[in-house]
Amino acid sequence: EIVMTQSPATLSVSPGERATLSCRASQSVSSSLAWYQQKPGQAPRLLIHGASTRATGIPARFSGSGSGTEFTLTISSLQSEDFAVYYCQQYNNWPPGTFGQGTKVEIK
Amino acid sequence: QVQVVESGGGVVQTGGSLRLSCAASGFAFSSYGIHWVRQAPGKGLEWVAFIRSDGSNKYYGDSVKGRFTISRDNSKNTLYLQMNSLRAEDTAVYYCARSGITIFAVATLWGQGTLVTVSS
C-alpha cells in the first residue's frame, strides 16, 4: 500500500499570504493525485485532481503541481474561507485510494 | 439540486450490525460509481469501499473486507453499506461520495456524513 505523507501538519498563515502544502508518496503515483479541503463540521470537497486540474468551481488561487512522488498545493492569497484541513489522495495504485494525514491551515 | 444524503447511522454494540443508506438526487445516479469514506473522530480520511455504476464490481479496504458489503439499487437512486461484526475502531462519520464520470477513483461530490458509534 502506498503511504502518503503531508507536511507540515499545521501551517500558520496570515490572510492574503501564500500557503504552500506538500504531499509525498512512498512510491511513484504518476499524476494520479487529488487534493481535498475540509472545513470544521463539513464534508470534504474536491479541489484538484490529476495533480494540477482544478475541479469545477474551484477558484484560480488554488493550484496544484508535481508528479511522481512529490506534490504541492499552493493557495496564492489566503482568504478567510480557506482556513481548513487539506488532504492529498493518491489513486494510481487503486484500490485503496490512500489519503495523507492532512495539513491544517490556520490563521496566524 | 445535485446531492447525496447519508442516513442510518447511530449507536450499536460491538459485534452488532448496521445498514447505512445514501440517497442521490439531481444527477444520473446509474452513471456513476460511488465511494464510502469514513473519518474517525478527530482523525483523517479512510477509504472504505467503492461500487461501479452498474454494481458489477465492488472493492473494499482491508480493514472492512469480509465484514462490510456495498450495494446499490439504481431504480431507487440509493447506495447501501451493510456493516457486520462492528468493532470500536469502526466508530466514525461515514461519507458517501460520487466518483468522477471518467476518473472513478476520485470522490467528486460528498454528502454530509452519518455518524456510527460502536460501543461496548
Image: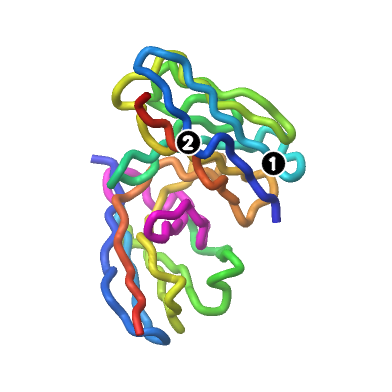
Amino acid at pointer 2: Thr
Q: Is residue A76 left or right of residue B17?
A: right
Q: Quadrant of residue A105?
A: top left
Kindly give the residue lying farthest to the front in the view shown.
Answer: A108
The answer to whether A55 is drawn above or below residue A36 in the figure is: above
Can you identify the residue that label 2 sits on?
A10
The answer to whether A46 is drawn above or below residue B98 in the figure is: above
Give percent across and percent down for residue B92. 38, 63
Residue in the image at 70% along x and 29% along y: A67
Give percent across and percent down for residue A79. 33, 19
Residue in the image at 34% along x and 80% along y: B119
Residue in the image at 50% along x and 56% along y: B46
Q: What element carries label 2?
A: strand
Q: Nearer the viewer, mark 1 or mark 2?
A: 2
**In the depicted view, which residue is nearer to us: A17 or A29?**
A17
The answer to whether A92 is drawn above or below residue B84 in the figure is: above
Q: Is residue A57 left or right of residue B62?
A: left
Chain identifier of the residue bearing label 2 in the image:
A
Q: Are marks 1 and 2 in contact (CB under 8 Å)?
A: no
Are marks 1 and 2 in one subunit?
Answer: yes
Residue in the image at 41% along x and 53% along y: B30
- Label drawn at residue A99: none
The answer to whether A57 is drawn above or below residue B8 in the figure is: above
Can you identify the residue that label 1 sits on?
A25
> Which residues lie in the magenta part?
B25-52
Where does the C terminus of chain B fall, quadrant-wise? bottom left
Q: Is residue A87 left or right of residue B13?
A: right
